[in-house]
Image (cartoon, rainbow, N blue to C red):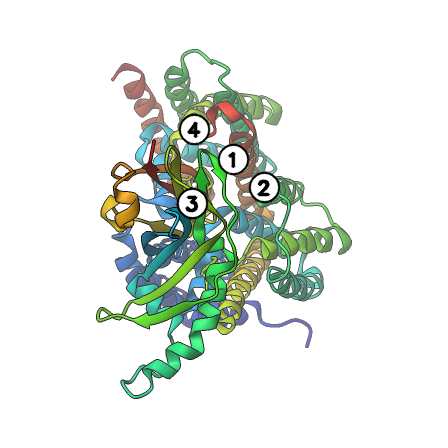
Amino acid sequence: MKHLPIQNLLLVLIGLLLPVSAWAAGTSFFMKGFYHPMMVPAHIIVLFSLGLLLGQQGWRTIRVVLPAYVLVLIASLIMTRYQTAAWNAELVLLPLAAVTGLLVVFKWNLSILLPLVIAIVAAVVIGMDSTVPRIPGLQSAKIYSHLTGSGVFASAVLAIISLIALALRGLLEGVILRILGAWSTAGAVLVVTLLLVPDVNP
Amino acid sequence: MKIINRFLTLLASAVFICVLSMQASLAAGFHYQLDLTAKLVNNPQNELTAIQMNWIYDKELSAILMDGEDLSEANKEASLEKRKAEIFKGLTEVKYFTTILLNKNVLDVGKVENYKLRLNKESRLEMNLTLPLTKPQALQGNTLEIVVTDDSAVGLATFVDTSRMLLGEQFKSICQQPDLAQKKLAEVDGHAQVVETMTINCR
Amino acid sequence: MISRLRYLLIVVFSLVVSNTALAHTGEGVTGGLTSGFMHPIAGLDHVTAMVAVGILGAFLGRPAIWVLPVVFPLVMAFGGVLGLVGVPIPFIEVGIAVSSIVLGLMILFTLKPPLWIAAVIVGAFAIFHGHAHGTELPTAANALAYSAGFVVSTGLLHLAGIGIGELIRWPMGQIVARAIGGIIALAGVWFLTG
């Protein structure tokens, strides 16, 4: 098979996620975990920029980087049971999103290595930042259910955005991706500034 | 045709992403509340030796913690017994959300030996335990503070009001009525950390 | 035909599914996201400028079609940083209104300056827009959600502008696009005087 029919893959993923998202959340810890990355916009913005980059670089990059990202994400999520992250996730993810957005703007032909490194860093930080809310006495099954939900969401969003970007990379010579990349950089830069400038930090 | 399809892909994707992000409102971050009633325990020398605590879990948290357990009348006690140790362990890991201070100095607490878990009529879990001090403390002429907070800001550990602080007969005669202060600290992951301080002035 | 129907089905389903969610706005992440998304749309002065940048890029052709909508947010971010750190820029609202006038007139009269001049003009106006957004960020319910929201909506506005600009492939489309430029310029005058 030369490459999978992109739009069919996209439809399958969207089709799977839409009924899930329509379900009243809060009924299970899987769902709570599923929506957790949504409550942390730094995760979304870096996944958005990374997805644009992967799609722009093409299927050759997606098929290597995406599985690597998923594996590292799973490992990081499991690590949250044993370690807490010492870093401030936003201060890592937002500059990463800004740089990734710029790479999308410039539309260079990158080797697989750079997107892979970006994806691995994103997976580690997102995973370690997805600790389950501390609830004394919570059953292990629920904890792992929450982590699984977070992992599924963070993987699915990246996959979907990558595939959308892959479908759009040829449209108007990739203008759309470049514009969206510029806007993610702009958003990330603004919020990093907000975090770093103490006087205006609410 | 290809361009139209791609534009439609773009439109559908943009709508999907907007919708998904709005759907997050249906699943806001989890919060829970634990209501605390505390009673001062004294020895024959009228020194403070422990604090008896009754933690009442909110309904949703109670349901989550007992999810999957058989709560029929016949098996309720066995199920509670089964979950008791793990729920207590969870509370121990967060140091019962409590810090005890005497004249602003933190008092050391010992190991809790006895604790009970039950399900009340409102299907809310109640954990009863006695938190011992490592050294008895005279309260006369001193100020005792019991500070409760969840530093992860996921939970709200609260006295609710001053009526939940029971001095006991011995300390009622030497201490003023308790005073409760609540303060909101900085946000943690979008949740506001609340600190409650119950002050018992025995000066 | 079947492909288009599939996509339309997804769009419609998404809109239906989102109905209940639309009621829940105003707090925390969702509130920040929604208010950020609505901010450029609710501010007509921002809408007109964003759309105008897209149209102008399409008018000037490649590579302006991507250079201008890319220059705008990147320089806008710089303007936003200035706003956040408290560097004052005078006449912000005037600058925003004038951006609509100038860009609208450029479209109306199909002015085609060299790319670097167009980029400088767009960049200059972007600083005003960015400064305005930057000063609003600290008061937003959730700053990053707010930024994510307005990133999505302004990106969509640019794309709408490009879509309108692409109409110039057809003679009628040229008239429509130029007319929209005229309306944008008039709107700018209204913002300035109103």
Residue that mark 3 sits on:
B190
Residue that mark 1 sits on:
A191
Please state the chain letter of the residue tagged with numbered disc 2 in the rendered image: A
- Calculate the distance from the C-alpha at mark 3 to the C-alpha at mark 2: 17 Å
Residue that mark 4 sits on:
C133
- Calculate the distance from the C-alpha at mark 3 to the C-alpha at mark 4: 22 Å
Disc 4 marks a residue whose amino acid type is: His
Q: Are marks 3 and 2 in contact (CB under 8 Å)?
A: no
Please state the chain letter of the residue tagged with numbered disc 4 in the rendered image: C
- Calculate the distance from the C-alpha at mark 1 to the C-alpha at mark 4: 11 Å
Name the residue nearer the viewer: A103 or C175.
A103
SS at circle 1: helix
Which residue lies at the image location 29% right of the left edge and 47% below the top edge?
B170
Q: Position of residue A106 (x, y in %)?
A: 67, 41
SS at circle 2: helix
Q: Position of residue A13 (x, y in %)?
A: 49, 69
SS at circle 3: loop
Name the residue nearer the viewer: A83 or B37.
B37
